[in-house]
Amino acid sequence: MQPNSEYFTDVLIIGSGAAGLSLALRLADQCKVTVLSKGPLNEGATFYAQGGIAAVFDETDSIESHVQDTLIAGAGLCDPSAVEFIASNAKDCVQWLIDQGVLFDTEITPGGESRYHLTREGGHSHRRILHSADATGKEVETTLVQKASTHPNICIRERCNAVDLITSRKIGLAGPLRVVGAYVWNRRLERVETLRAKTVVLATGGAAKVYQYTTNPDISSGDGIAMAWRAGCRVANLEFNQFHPTCLYHPQARNFLLTEALRGEGALLKRPDGTRFMPDFDQRGELAPRDIVARAIDHEMKRLGADCMYLDISDKPADFVMQHFPTIYEKLLTLGLDLTKEPIPIVPAAHYTCGGVMVDHCGRTDLNGLYAIGEVSYTGLHGANRMASNSLLECVVYAWSASQDILKQLPQIELVRQLPEWDDSRVDNSDERVVIQHNWHELRLFMWDYVGIVRTTKRLERAMRRIQMLQQEIHEYYANFRISNNLLELRNLVQVAELIVRCALSREESRGLHYTLDYPGQLENPKPTILQP
């Protein structure tokens, strides 16, 4: 073993977004925490989140209303107890963010008092979205990074990919099955390291990179879902992949998101001829839930043979638009587009993974000592369709509830003394990386074509056949060559793609984000789709 290639910690958190860093800060005063960041520390989905975070701060709003809106958006598949749990703890957990130094936008009331400026997004019946202009995620992430980077009990390791979880069964340890650590690919040193831990937390985000077009950063490759599945955890509802309705259609900015808050402040969706179409699909118009809006855009594009639709807020005063959406305004200007003067071309793109690793209210998975929080998890909050700005909220609420449980359990857990080192003595360096790139592009393209916004059984079966062929190729490649970042991500994406298609094939109805031409109706008593390893 190379020097310093084995480490230990009380709690290993895999992922450095809002969920992972919030949890680290809540734990660090009482234990040692290691946070793995796959790329640079702030290169995650949180950093790019524009809209905001939902919580009841207005006295005319209510927790009951937030719950009801979420249940409606979830199309009959939310877990009511999870929705109630998250909405009830929303204000306290958002206040914790404020206490850490997160600055949300404020406004002055007619009476001269300062209060938080709340915006409204699709599916919400009230203004309840706290935000920092149109770069809320950036404000949250940079604040948490600053706090975590200076905490003496938090060790942050950038450019480190978790390869696989290590369980007690793998090392022949007696007693109940539990997680005891993880193998970690240190990209800077190009070696696999062993990390022992009393508790491991998956905060790895979603899997939208499985699709050709996505608003997500490159790291969203379903790593946590795949690792948990390989370790024996159940997953649920992976057929529900949310496609954000309004991603910029431009060759130089393929994954730039145009926040739903634009529609909340009056932006209209239009055809190329300038006419509106959303009232033809839903009485809520542009503020209908995302699944409805994305399908409407997809329908109009296919009906008209158009490359894109358009988002138009040019009838609002220019000062208003620039004040509320400065990041988007400046970005579009660099591409020759003026948000204040013209409609902006948009298309739907894969955005959010509504299913994931099954957890309870404390973020506990099926494997002792393993937790999952944030987008990697299935809590029951989102059902068949995530309501806007509930995702950052889920991150911070489960960071709180998981921290309470972890601190209670830690004193009873013994750190294993030694783990087997990674063995790469029988593999070679690959001279055929083009194979990985080819498989990578093939996977993302057929997932977009066959498992996208509108599906059929035939398309899903075709996707499954392709997935099985890729899995065989990747397994052979993984067994014979030294690992790399692209190989690890491809291995995980193909695994998650299989789980997505298996879930989609088992749901014989159209509900929320899962729309199939073969089963356009809805079942009377829908249930979550649960897969067991």
Image: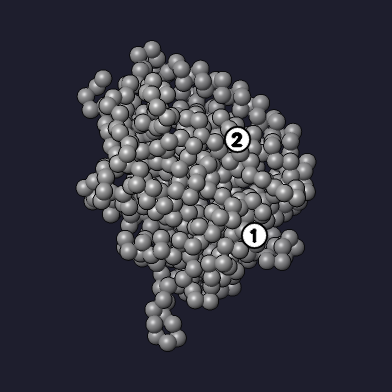
Instruction: Point out the tag, 2 or 1, that comes first from the N-terminus.
Output: 1
Mark 1: secondary structure: helix
- Callout 1 crowding tier (Cα within 10 Å): few <14, some 14–19, many ≥20: some
In percent of width and height, residue 525 lies at: 72, 49
Quadrant into which the N terminus falls: top left
The part of the image, by quadrant, that contains residue 35 is top left
In percent of width and height, residue 455 lies at: 71, 41
Q: Which mark is residue 531?
A: 2
- Callout 2 crowding tier (Cα within 10 Å): few <14, some 14–19, many ≥20: some
Instruction: Name which residue lies at 62% across and 55% down.
Output: 74
Q: Nearer the viewer, residue 167 or 280?
A: 167
Q: How many marks?
A: 2
Question: How is the model colour-coded?
Answer: one colour
Q: Is residue 380 left or right of residue 330?
A: right
Q: Which mark is residue 250?
A: none
In percent of width and height, residue 88 lies at: 49, 62
Q: Nearer the viewer, residue 394 or 401?
A: 401
Q: Amino acid at mark 2?
A: Leu
Residue lying at the far top of the rendered structure: 426
Quadrant into which the C terminus falls: top right
Q: Badges 2 and 1: C-beta atoms under 8 Å apart?
A: no
Q: In the figure, 166 relative to 528: above or below?
A: above
Q: Is residue 49 visible?
A: no
Mark 2: secondary structure: strand
Q: Which residue is mark 1?
A: 72
Instruction: Name which residue lies at 35% across and 14% down.
Output: 425
Q: Amino acid at mark 1?
A: Ile
Instruction: Name which residue lies at 54% across and 36% down.
Output: 234
In percent of width and height, residue 95 lies at: 38, 65
Q: CA distance from mark 2 to mark 1?
A: 25 Å
Q: Is residue 282 left or right of residue 160?
A: right
Q: Is residue 454 visible?
A: yes
